[in-house]
Image (cartoon, helix red, strand yellow):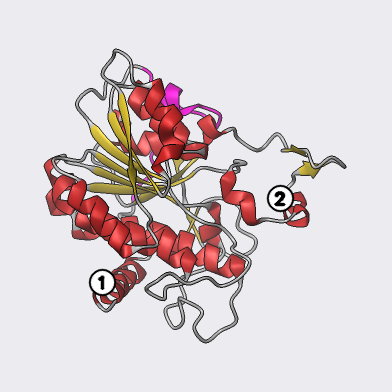
Amino acid sequence: MTVTEPLTTPFTARATAAEVLDGVDLTGHRMIVTGGASGIGAETVRALAGAGAEVTVATREPGRAATLVGEFAGPGPGRVRSAALDLADLSSVAAFLASWEGPLHALVANAGVMALPDRQLTAEGWELHLATNYLGHFALARGLRGNLRAGAGRVVAVSSGAQLRRAVDFDDPQFERQPYDPWTAYFQSKTADVLLVVGIARQWAADGITANAANPGYVMTNLQRHLDDDTLRAFGVTIDEAGNRTVPDYYKNPAQGAATSVLLAASPLLAGVTGRYFEDNQEAEVVPGGPEAMTGVAEHAVDPAAAGRLWAYAEQVLTSR
């Protein structure tokens, strides 16, 4: 990452995705949002299409995007379509890539899994956090490189404050020897997401492709579906006797959580900006990381050497499947 003063924008942490794009015309732009059928992904799609873009919702179950497709079926430039994509299945990634033609102006790597209770493996034998959150997106972005080049495209990786907690364990990234821990798996996969954009920024700069990472903040979505009630309470959620959940004031709604992704994907304010990490619509400062860190991006998540090492690891894993 280039050492510069952190970039600031006029948008607050509570700005919505639509507010970030107020007055921005994306007519003629083609964009992909993985996992865009629900949660902050759906709000990302709504904001981009609302500004005139043609947005493809890439999801394991395309039928779940029917409501979004219908919302933009009327007059106006914005359009939404859906397409099948399972990031944990390389044959699905290959099929999606084979179906895509023409320029791509933004790829929002939004899909992800969190804290799976047990170690799960893909058909290729990959641990599911690393496969879904990082390796699948790496394969997708690499396959779309020419399309992104044609569109002077942007890549947005949706990471998390979880990247502060853990560097990638290059000695055993898929828990083949050490005991599996759901949070360690999630933490390092979110660090990998940041390292992905650092790698793209360094390796594809000559293509005119930019890449940045977004932290959406605390948002209650389907991502938390594997968390039990005690864990949710530890995250500040109140659960009554009937099982109803109430989130604290510091949580964002999905439209607010999508704002930083949309900022990076389409705002003119981010033209030419690459290899950085944003939270609450502002570029974050680089910090040491660790259990006490609450904001910022960890040094280990933006380390160019680690980014290069992870890039080489991903290429090796994908070619040896």
Disc 2: CA contacts within 10 A as few (<14), some (14-19) or many (>=20): few
Residue 100 in which image quadrant: top left
Residue 230 in which image quadrant: bottom right
Label placed on residue 315: 1
- From the viewer's perspective, tell me whether residue 182 is left or right of residue 145: right
The residue drawn where x is 46% and y is 35% is 42
Which quadrant: the N terminus?
Answer: bottom left
- From the viewer's perspective, tell me whether residue 66 is left or right of residue 211: right
The residue drawn where x is 34% and y is 57% is 137
- From the viewer's perspective, tell me whether residue 319 is left or right of residue 129: left
Residue that badge 2 annotates: 235
**Residue extent of the magenta highlight:** 4-22
Image: 199 above or below 273: below
Q: Earlier in the sequence, mark 2 or mark 1?
A: 2
Residue 18 in which image quadrant: top left
Which quadrant: the C terminus?
Answer: bottom left
Q: Residue furthest top?
A: 75
Residue 190 picture location, percent across and down: 47, 59
The residue drawn where x is 64% and y is 56% is 226
Residue closer to the observer: 307 or 52: 52
For the residues bearing labels 2 and 1, Cβ distance under 8 angstroms: no
Residue 284 picture location, percent across and down: 46, 47
